[in-house]
Image (cartoon, rainbow, N blue to C red):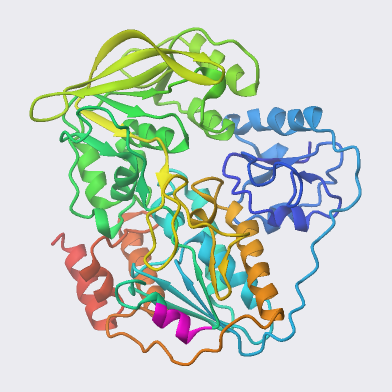
Amino acid sequence: MPYVVTQSCCSDGACVLACPVNAIHPAPGEPGFAEAEMLYVDPVTCVDCGACATACPVDALLPHTKLTDAQLPFVELNATYYKDHPHADRSPLALVPRHRASSTEGLRVAVVGAGPAGLYAADELLKLPGVEVDVFDRLPTPHGLARYGVAPDHPRTKQVIELFSKIEREPGFRYRLNVEAGTDVTIEELRSSYHAVIYAVGAATDRRLGVPGEDLPGSVSATDFVAWYNGHPDADDARYPLDSERAVVIGNGNVALDVARILTADRGRLATTDISDRALLALGDSRIREVVVLGRRGPAEAAFTLPELVGLAALDDVDVVVEGDVSVTSLKTEVLAELASRPRRPGRRRIVLRFHAAPARIVGDERVEGLEVVRTEVVDGRAVPTGDTELVEAGLVLRAIGYRARPVPGLPFDEQRALVPNDGGRVEAGLYVGGWIKRGATGFLGTNKSCSKETVERLLDDLDAGLLPTPTTVVPPFEYEVDHRGWLAIDRAERALGEIAGRPRVKLTDRVALRDATTPVRADALRGRLRAGR
């Protein structure tokens, strides 16, 4: 097999379009594309041209001769996909033709949210002549979960930001950062100033457990914890109890594995990443030696993706332990069974994957002291409690059972599904949604590309039908607004500080420092203070 997709795949489909022989599936428009854990290269069809590797924004495609030992399982993973999905029809991918609107000259669109969904939507719009796009975000920095959600020890996945940098340089693109829609500018003001408004605000909160003791100190959201170690300004003052030997993560999706990895990671290795300085110092003093990751159902139903599991299994400085027997029914359970058979190495930090276990209550007087867990069995695909309970001692409990969107002022909201009701992204003429606020918290970074394309198609349909309103006002600039030049200044400042520390960047984590970095004189003073350790 000449080229192989590895674990950092973002599934945006750029490689599919670049491949001259239709060797990468599932492709956009094919069943399973939006839900696939990753894309796969067909070993029979691939002609080793390298076009896919050039197009990939996160360097996920490599020649088989350049794989590390940890990446070798992906050779079988790619090949096995085609055993189950042979793709007998080898005709070239039928590309969707570009939408031909009556005229896009002078079309002005506001995109609320500067994360992947918002930037992919801007990219689709700016492919059309004469379109202007203003991207708003309440933070002074863009890129959303690509900056504040991807684990710091996954630097290749973060390379998608380089793609976003190209979008930011497109003619007609403008940043209006540090401006909060709904507070600084109302939805009515946006709608009267633009032909259309696309909300791509993501899912900013987490799902609750609904068990006693959930609000005890030491019971925290994995969403907030991830924001903290990634340097999100909203989490700059957060503190977490890391003074016990065990932590428990409830949920076994990719976020749960990220949290477990960061809590047990070698501190020297973390010091080479862009992790928040405050998190790096706190984790350096951490006493945590074991992280237990709980899944309500069995190994076969685990929510984490196979690529993330393969990456976890490749850790050489942490013991990954799987409790109980594992029946091999898939590649995922095959990896889990191999982990279950590994001998345990004394003295190593441990990540324990425990299945058939659900939280019953969080125990403690003034803070978390443990978690009562009830054993479950899977009946018709559901985890059913058996009544057998166990107390797991822990000083930190993190819930990682999924993201949840918040209601958006001025937009309808479905509380049960935690999204804005829409038809392919269309709420009504002139008002649209994209990303997680549109489809719920599902998919991967690259899933937002096809999602945003669909939303833009609905917008252009309304343009063709003459349904878009004509702007009558202009949203004026705000004194505290950060434009593209301001973001580039922040980026330069962070990279310069990172160069001093031997890291890719040192993130500025409070709003005052971020604002100072946009002004050359203040940026120089800021760098001087940080060099001096003040």
Name above or below for residue 138 compared with residue 28: below
Please name whichever residue, 369 or 346, is drawn nearer the observer in this view of the structure.
369
Name above or below for residue 2 compared with residue 92: above
Residue 178 placement, left or right of 83: left
Start-end of magenta stretch: 188-194
- Residue occupying image coordinates x 66% and y 40%: 66
Name above or below for residue 34 compared with residue 234: above
- Residue occupying image coordinates x 40% and y 11%: 344
Residue 192 part of the magenta-drawn span? yes
Residue 245: in sight, yes or no?
no
Name above or below for residue 60 compared with residue 123: above
x, y percent for residue 297: 48, 20
Displayed quadrant of residue 480: bottom left
Residue 19 placement, left or right of 534: right
In which quadrant of the rendered image does the C terminus lie? bottom left
Displayed quadrant of residue 231: bottom left
Residue 232: in sight, yes or no?
yes
In which quadrant of the rendered image does the N terminus lie? top right
x, y percent for residue 34: 65, 47
